[in-house]
Amino acid sequence: MEISSIINSLNDAQRVAVSAPGQAMLVLAGAGSGKTRVLVHRIAWHIQVDGVSPHNILAVTFTNKAATEMRGRIEELLNISARSMWIGTFHGLAHRLLRRHAKQAGLTESFQVIDADDQLRLIKRLLKNLSLDEAKWPPKQAQWFINAQKDEGVRAKHMLDSGDFYQRQMIAIYRAYEEVCERSSLVDFAELLLRAHELLRDNEDVLAFYQQRFRFVHVDEFQDTNTIQYAWLRLLTEGRDNLFVVGDDDQSIYGWRGAKIENIYNFQSHYPNHKVVRLEQNYRSSGQILKAANSLIANNDGRMGKELWTDAGDGEPISLYTAFNEQDEAYFVVEKIRQWVNDGGRRSDVAILYRSNAQSRQFEEKLMSTGTPYRVYGGLRFFERMEIKNALAYLRLMSNRHDDASFERVVNTPARGLGAKTLDDIRALARGQGISLWQAAAESIAQGKLSARAANAMKGFMALIKQLADEVEDKELFEKVKAVVEHSGLIGLYKKEKGDKGEARVENLEELVNAARLFDYDDDNGENLGELDMFLAHAALEAGDMQGDDYEDCVQLMTLHSAKGLEFKQVFLVGLEDGLFPSLQSTEDPARLEEERRLCYVGITRAMEQLYLTHAESRRLYGKESYPRPSRFIREIPPEFIQEIRLRANVSRPVTATVQPRSSMLGGSYKLGQRVSHAKFGEGVVLQMEGEGAQERVQINFHEVGLKWLMVSYAKLEAL
Ligand code: ATP
Ligand code: MG
C-alpha cells in the first residue's frame, strides 16, 4: 500500500534512485527535476521497505524550513512519526552533537552560540584591545579571514607565522579571537562545523557510535557544501557506502562563502562504488521559462552538462519591464501582484527576488502602502532585533557568566550609571589577567578599585543576574524568559522611547515570551540537552523562521540566495542591472561572474507559471544615484522568449520625488529612459522632457559629464 505511494508519483529515473540497493549515490540534475522529492522518497523507502528505523537516518537540508517540510512529507507519506530522525542543517546538527558531547568537544556545558553580528562585535572589541586601528584592519576583513580558515578546517595554531605583514597580523587576530571565545565559551557558526568535525575525528567512541547509528546519510543541495562539511560527512560514512547526495553544479552559489563545487568530483573518487543518476524532466516551470534558463546557463564554461525538458507546454513568455527608476519598478511589481490577487491568485504563490537585501525597502514600502501582507526572509529578523538580543543577552549571562559578548551588551542597558572609564578599567583588567569581564568586575569590586557609585551600580547588575538565575532555575523555559523581560528593566526602557518604535519593541519582547512558550526542541529519545541553551542556540541559528505568521497569505520577499530550492507560481526577478546583478565585484572576475549567472539561473528556475524580469534606468541605492545598463543576463536570454512590457500613455506612472515627467511623457519625440548619444557629451539617458516642437527640451544624464538640459532642435541627439 504505502510502497506504491512512495513510487507511483515518480518517473523512471527517479524510481531508480529511490529504490536502488543501499549504496553511495549521486543524483545530479538541474533545477525542478525532483531531486528533493527523490531524497524524501528515498528516506521513506528505507523506512518502509528496508525496515530502517527513522532513528537510524540522518538528513541534511539547506534551511530549517526545508527540514521541517521534509519531516512532514515523510510522516505524511508513511503515516508514522519521524521525530527521532535527525534532520536539519549542517549547523543545526553540529550544534546538537556539540551539546550532547560538550566535554569531549572541549567545550563547557553552557557554551553559547553567537551569530555573525555578535561575532563582528567581538572582533571589533578585540581589535581595540590589541590597539589595532579599525581603518587599517577592517573588522569585517578579519571576520572573513577567520571564518574562511575555519571553513577549511584550519586553526590559528596550524598556521605558520609567516607570510607578509598582513597575513601575520591576521593570524595574530585569529589566535586572539580563539582565546576570547574559549574563555567566554562562545561558539560562532563556522566553529560549530569545525568543532563537530574535530569531535568525530578525535573521539573514536563518539565516531563509532554515530557511524553505527546513522545507517543512511542524505544530503540535499550537495553542490554547496564546504570543505569541513564534506569532511564531516566523510567521517560519518567512512568505509561504508551509505551516503546519498543530490545536487546541481549549475546551482552552486556559495563559492564566495567557501562552498566547493569540487566536492561533487571528490565524492565520485571517494566512493568508488557510487551510482550516478541523472534526472532530465523538469516538473516545475513552463516551457519558455525553462528554455530561457537553459540558454542563460549555457554561457557558463566547465559545466557538468545537463539539459532539462518539460512536457508542460510553452506557457507564457517571460515579461521584461524597464522601469524608470527603482520606485517605478516597485510600483509596477506591486500593481502586477494586485492584478494577480484580483484574478484569484494567492499572495504566497508570489515571490519578489533580489540580489541584495537593501533592495527590499522599496517593495516593502509599496506593499505596505497598498495594505498587501508580505513577509521578508533574511531582513532584520525577529531574533536579530536589538531588544530581543538584549533580552537574550540577559538569558545568556544567566546561563554562562563568562559570556563577555552578552556582558558588554547589557551591563549598562538599561543605563545603570556605569561610565566608560569604569568599563574600560574592567576590560583592561580582564585582558591583563586573561579572565572574563564578569570575573574582572567582581575582582574590581573586591579590591576596591571602583568608585563607590560605580561599585554599587555594578553590584546591582551582578546581583540582578544571580537573582534572576536562582529564581527561575527550576521553572519552565517561558517563565525564565518572562522573568527577564519583566525584571531586567528593558520594558521600562522601551516604554520611555517615543513613538511607535518603543511600542513595537515592547510588543516584540512580549512575543519573545510567546516564542519560548511554543519552543519545542526535538527531544530525541527524551534526552535533556538544557532547554534554555537549546532555545538560545535556536535564536542564533534559526533567526529567519520567526517573522510573520506562516499561515497568513503573504507575498514572499527574499534574496536570490535564500530562494534556493523553493518554487512560486509568479516570480519577479528585480534589479537586473549591470553592477547590481551581476554585482560590481563580479564583472572583472570570470569565476565570480559565472557564479552570478548560476544565481540568475536559480532565480529563473524558481518560477512555475509567470516570470517577470525588471530593471531600472536610474537607481538610488546605498544613498547613491546611478544609471545602470540592463544586466547582461537579460541579453543572454534569446529574445523570442521575452515579451517587453511597454506602458501605454494612459497608464499612470508613479509621481516620484526626483522627477515628475508625467505630462511631458505624452508628447515629444523622446522616451523617458531612452539612451541617446551626443557628439560632444557622449552617451546618456533621457530623464525629463518639456515643451514641444522647436521649444522641446530634454534633460539627459550623460555618463561622462552628468546632467544637462539640451534643446532638441540643436542638440543632434542620436537615439541608441
Ligand atoms: P531544485 O534544484 O530547485 O532544488 P529539485 O530538483 O529539488 O529542484 P523538486 O523541488 O524536488 O526539484 O521538484 C520540483 C517540483 O516538481 C515540485 O513541485 C515536485 O513536487 C514536482 N515533481 C517532481 N517530480 C515529479 C514527478 N515525478 N511527478 C510530478 N511532479 C513532480
Ligand atoms: Mg531541491
Image (cartoon, rainbow, N blue to C red):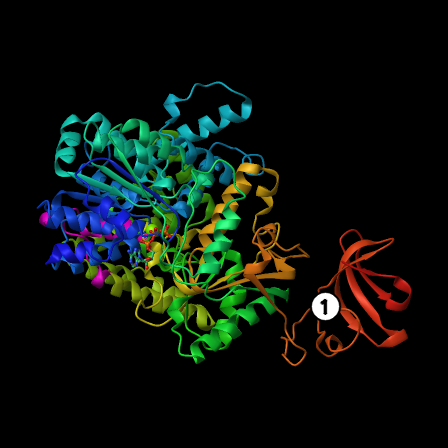
Residue 384 visible at all: yes
Residue 435 visible at all: no
Which stretch did the figure color magenta?
Answer: 516-539
Does 398 lie within the magenta span?
no
| Residue indicated by mark 1 | 672
Q: Nearer the viewer, residue 718 or 532?
A: 718
* Residue at 86 percent of width and 67 percent of height: 712
Left or right: residue 528 versus residue 105 is left
- The spot of residue 110 in percent (x, y) is 23, 42
Quick one: SS at disc 1? loop
Does 536 lie within the magenta span?
yes
Q: Please, is residue 77 above or below residue 108 in the view?
A: below
Quadrant (top left/top right/bottom left/bottom right) for the C terminus: bottom right
Q: Please, is residue 494 above or below residue 71 in the view?
A: below
How would you rate the neighbour count of disc 1 (Cα within 10 Å): few for under 14, some for 14-19, many for 20 or more? many
- The spot of residue 613 in percent (x, y) is 54, 61
Tell me the kind of residue under disc 1.
Leu
